[in-house]
Image (cartoon, rainbow, N blue to C red):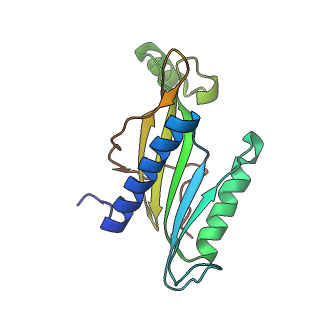
């Protein structure tokens, strides 16, 4: 059976996607963000009751991404997190068929930031213990550079990829 989001996770994703759409439309980009739901065993300062959603706007310098990922993983563990939803602007490599064949042959794939065929995207990664769901949308820009993303949120697909921001809730 294919893993799916539960009702609360789907609602969190829809709300965050809508907020991201408005932010990009207004400011031209979105800051890296993490929304983390914590379980009933955690009481955060200022929260009205156990179990909260904590929004974290992240300042991620290029050379500090591993440190930020380690901090988020530590926070999720200490806060008894049930779910984490990350929103990150990123580059995605889009090789031509010829380039893809060459990359497969050599085993060398360029970093997306240095790939001339890259696309600017917003990635959404919803994680729970042992499972992750991921989706992305291209950032579209007008000739004047005004950015937007589609109004309709993409489906999040079950994803067990590895990367610095994966496995935030895993031990």
Q: Is residue 164 left or right of residue 142?
A: right
User: From the viewer's perspective, is 46 left or right of 122?
Assistant: right
Q: Nearer the viewer, residue 168 or 32?
A: 32
Horizontal side of 130 relative to 36 (left or right) equals left
Q: Position of residue 8 (x, y in %)?
A: 36, 67
Residue 161: x, y in percent? Answer: 47, 49
**What residue is rendered at 48% in x and 16% in y?**
99
What percent of the width, then of the height, locates residue 49? 52, 84
Picture layout, residue 155 above or below residue 140: below
Q: Quadrant of the N terminus?
A: bottom left
Along the line of sight, the residue nearer the viewer: 60 or 131: 60
Residue found farthest to the front: 26
Q: Position of 8 compared to 42: left or right?
A: left
Q: Residue 165 in the image: x percent, y percent?
A: 58, 53
From what the image shows, is residue 137 above or below residue 37?
Answer: above
- Residue 170 higher or lower than 122, as above or below: below
Question: Is any part of residue 39 visible from this angle?
Answer: yes
The residue sitting at 51% across, 23% down in the picture is: 103
Q: Quadrant of the C terminus?
A: bottom right
Instruction: List the single residue furthest toward the left.
Output: 1
Q: Quadrant of residue 73?
A: bottom right
Q: How many numbered badges does the structure rendering display?
A: 0
Image point 73% across, 40% down: which residue? 62
The residue positioned 50% from the left and 39% from the top of the image is 122
Residue 111 shows up from this direction: no
Viewer-nearest residue: 78 or 53: 53
């Amino acid at each position: 059976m294919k893993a799916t989001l539960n009702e609360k996770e789907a609602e969190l994703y829809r709300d965050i996607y809508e907020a991201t759409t408005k932010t990009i439309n207004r400011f031209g980009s979105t800051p890296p963000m993490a929304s983390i739901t914590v379980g009933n065993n955690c009481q955060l300062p200022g929260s009205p009751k156990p179990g909260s959603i904590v929004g974290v706007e992240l300042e991620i310098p290029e050379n500090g991404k591993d440190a930020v990922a380690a901090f988020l993983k530590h926070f999720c563990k200490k806060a008894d997190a049930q779910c984490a939803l990350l929103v990150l602007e990123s580059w995605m490599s889009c090789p031509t068929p010829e380039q893809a064949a060459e990359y497969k042959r050599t085993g060398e794939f360029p970093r997306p930031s240095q790939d001339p065929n890259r696309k600017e995207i917003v990635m959404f990664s919803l994680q729970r213990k042992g499972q992750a769901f991921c989706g992305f949308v291209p950032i579209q820009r007008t000739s004047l550079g005004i950015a937007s993303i589609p109004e309709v949120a993409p489906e999040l697909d079950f994803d067990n990829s590895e990367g610095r921001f994966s496995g935030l809730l895993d031990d």
